[in-house]
Image (tube, helix red, strand yellow):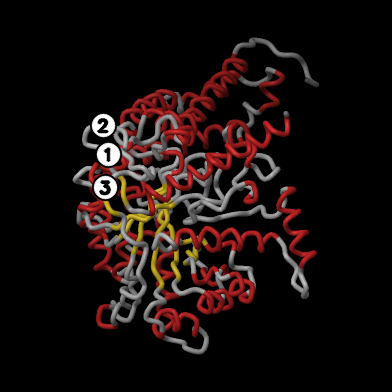
Amino acid sequence: MKMKAHLISRRKLAALLCTLTLFTLIVFLSGQFGLSADTDEPQYNARGIPNEDNYLKTKRRTKEVFDWNQLEIVPEESRNKGRFIPPKRVVHLDLKGAPPKISYLLQLLPMIKKAGGTDILIEYEDMFPHWGPLANLSALNAYSRKDVAELLSEADKQGLGVIPLVQTFGHLEFALKLEEFQTKLSGLPVGPMLCIFRFTSWANVVYIQVYQLGQCSRCIERLEKANAESTGSTYYDGRYLFLQHVRRLGEMVRGLNKVPIIWDDMLRNMDKSNLKESGIGELVEPMVWVYVEDIDRFVDNTVWRTYSAVFGGVWVASAYKGAFGERLYVVNMFRHLQNHLSWLDVMYRSNMSFDVHIYLVFLFMHCTHCTVLYCTAGWSRYDHFAVQCELLPVAVPSLVLSLAVVTSGKGDIHTIRKVQEILKCSPQKSLMLYDELRRNPNQWDLYRCSFPGVKAFSLISNYNTQRVEVEQLYTRLKEKDGWMSDWHVRHKFSSPWRVEETLKTTNYLPGNVRDLEKQAKRTLGLYFDEFTVKEWMEQHLLPLSEKLAEINNMADILTKPNHWPRRPI
């Protein structure tokens, strides 16, 4: 009976996954999302597919990811002094766990278009409004179906293509954390990866990033069997499982006349022969992502030559936020600018050194359908369990600067003036020039501008000031000054006069932090829901209050005694 119940449970789980995959494919890869005019529930035909005639008139048809034969290389005369300008410039919107209000996203889309964006890459994760047996995959503060339809409609209005980013192998914590999906784990603690042999082959492959392979019992059995049946010298390991999975899902997505895009980190160390033998080069397009300044350090000539020999098209990904630290609250615009300029240089070099960069010449010049396309990523969290990094409203200047630089092919004064115009900055102060960014990578004076999100930027500027003061006071009292160390507190032994004099010049800080909490609640509420605001305040403002409370408690302990023992203490 237990075995029978176990089999039934497994069948239910497999059916649930099939439902998830079919739902994803129908909603995203068919390029349609809409609502019935009469009800909040989507209307279906006999096959379970939403009926075309029941969609809102403002429905959005997601564009084909790419038809490489129709996409032309940017002609030389359209380039800015020889700089390569990517024909597609895609902006990644990471909505997981900290969803900006739809009303705010709608304000951003025209700005993205004006700055040079051509498409948006939307990562919903748990913010998508699943229903039916998949309802638990949605966060309790997920977007409604009406929200999603409104976002897609506005993107269509702005002439922006929409590409969905859907987890299919890695970064599945949002599903695997749930008890009902625990049996889908790869036999390891809850993490980003599922065991691919506990599922049917029905899934959507758009985003893959996997760090644990071949570690569950079923995967080990599969590898042992493959190696036992191998007649040559080939040895199968976790990469074999990965490529099989990519091929299976890639075939399914290609069957829907869509081009799946996968992030390339799992491919970089694979042999060209293995990649060719797998057949994935005819199915998927890799997204080569490097977010730092030295791109060649992470993607060398060998990788490019391999990709040019295997794949028909290649994407590259920079970043405009969320790349230099899990806990960052403000964007280092100088480092991100350097990342974009480095990518432009990598692309430009294809015209300068045929022998050394033949792989780039092949990709950019000699293959009419092998174009390199550009995406700039803006991560909100490093994974589902991580804290929030830079908030989207605070990163708008970096986003606009990134798009403008990639669109013009360089970061000269004319490009910067366009950025200042889009952000509605005062011309009285030079902002975001290269040397200015080097000196001040955060560009705090941007609070003088008038862009969607400037109030949040001003808040973060105020927070940075208060945070620095509190951190400096806390460190000075506990580690540098000679009267309020942990030893003094533990033994209640110090000079009350010294303690009082030390704190006399900083007694304004608790009031400042309380005012900052009020400002944060009021300001962030313009852009995010109450849950996101509360999380940000707990992550950033609560530690300041706790440190000030600790300092106050230390002062009370050290100033209370009026007599002390003779040494030794």
Precedes in sequence: disc 2 or disc 3: 2
Whether tag 1 and tag 3 are in contact, CB under 8 A, the answer is no
Residue 66, percent from left and from top:
36, 66
Q: Distance between the residues labelled 2 and 3?
A: 15 Å
Separation of marks 1 and 2 at Cα, in angstroms: 7 Å
SS at badge 2: loop
Residue 87 location, x and y as percent?
32, 70
Image quadrant in which the C terminus is located: top right
Above or below, 20 against 333 in this view is: above
Q: Name the residue under label 1.
A: 35
Front tag of 1 and 3: 3
Q: In this view, does 288 lie to the left or right of 407?
A: right
Tag 3 secondary structure: helix
In the visual, does 228 lie left or right of 69?
Answer: right
Q: Is residue 186 visible?
A: yes
In primary-sequence order, the first of circles 1 and 3 is 1
- Three-letter code, disc 1: Leu
When asked about the image quadrant of residue 279, the answer is bottom right
List the single residue furthest toward the front: 46
Residue at figure coordinates x 39%, y 34% from the top left: 142
Q: Which of 212 and 533 is in front in this view?
A: 212
Q: Quadrant of the N terminus?
A: top right
Q: Could you say which is closer to the camera, residue 539 or residue 205? A: 205
Residue that numbered label 3 is attached to: 52
The crowd level at tag 3 (other Cα within 10 Å; few <14, some 14-19, many 20+) is: some
- What residue is rendered at 32% in x and 40% in y? 458
For label 2, the residue is 39
Amino acid type of the residue tagged 3 in the rendering: Glu
CB-based contact (under 8 Å), mark 1 and mark 2: yes
* Residue 48 pos. (x, y %): 38, 42
Q: Can residue 465 be seen in this view?
A: no
